Amino acid sequence: MMSKMTIQNLPKIERFDYSKHLPQSSADKTSDVFFVLFSLYIAEREQKELTQLVLEKALFKTEQELATENISFLNTFFYVNKLGPHNNVFYKYLDELEGADLIDKEGNNISLTAKGLNTCVDLLEKIPKNSNVLNILVKLQAKIKYCSSNVRRSVDETHEQKVIDTTDKNETKTINQLIAEIKPENLFERGSQFKYINLFSSSNPQKVSPPPNILNKLENILAKVDEIDFQQNISFENLFA
């Protein structure tokens, strides 16, 4: 369950700011790709079906839960869309993972390839035990299990989310109200892609990212520089222990 929020710490709706709402470096982008990739790994481990919608909901809900602790793991903000919090940058991440043969996409369903599975296992073994990254993966695991089993409810919950619209006299609204106002099907007419959701009451949340050696290895894999042997035997046991 999400903790109760006061008016003071409700998420804020903001106009798009390039320096704030998108990754600012290659490392920021690769960190986001890491968590997208591991969402697929968690879904595979939990034998859950992952769609693009479930992926977005799980990532958003995890970031929202961490925001209550002033912790952030994503560098890509969400904006208001007819399906609630959304960002098509995540779909570009999926295209990049697919291009590196780490995932398969079939319709809206996404799954790991053998290479993707082995990549995750290899990277996971390099994450220090009891690290903040592992703690986030555990939280993400819970959200993926919840959202994949309660798709309609998870959509409704994000639609009912209260926010403060700083673009409209700091009015308190729900995402549903914003959807009705901006008609996101008319993206380029009304500029709804510029209504970004800032989950953090602090201007400087603690950022959590995988260690540089993991980011470098993933960047090499994405660039097809570092090929791994994906025929090795895989065991899921105790990987989060």
Image (tube, rainbow, N blue to C red):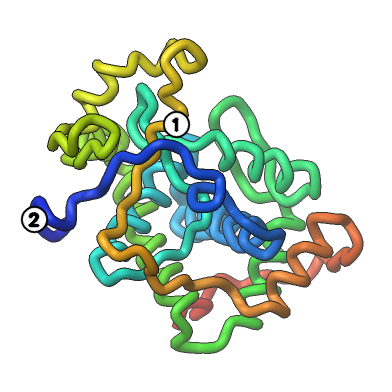
The amino acid beneath tag 2 is Thr
In this rendering, would 47 be left or right of 213?
A: left
Against 114, is 69 above or below? below
Depth order, front residue of 32/129: 32
Q: Which residue is mark 1?
A: 194
Extreme residue toward the right, this view? 225
Depth order, front residue of 191/107: 191
Against 154, is 19 above or below? below
Q: Quadrant of the N terminus?
A: bottom left
Name the secondary structure under disc 1. helix
Depth check, mark 2 against mark 1: the one in front is 1
Q: Where does the image place residue 16, in percent across and percent down from the top left?
A: 46, 38
Quarter residue 159 falls in: top left
In this rendering, would 170 be left or right of 146?
A: left
Depth order, front residue of 227/82: 82
Residue 238 visible in the picture: yes
Q: Which residue is mark 2?
A: 6
Q: Quadrant of the C terminus?
A: bottom left
Q: Where does the image place residue 97, in percent across and percent down from the top left?
A: 71, 48
Q: Residues within 10 Å of mark 1 (few under 14, many from 20)?
A: some
Q: Residues within 10 Å of mark 2 (few under 14, many from 20)?
A: few
State yes or no: discs 2 and 1 in contact (Cβ < 8 Å).
no
Q: Who's the residue at 77% across and 71% down the image?
A: 217
Q: Who's the residue at 62% across and 56% down the image?
A: 24
Q: Who's the residue at 44% across and 48% down the image?
A: 48
Residue 44 visible in the picture: no
- Whichever of labels 2 and 1 marks the residue nearer the N terminus, that label is 2
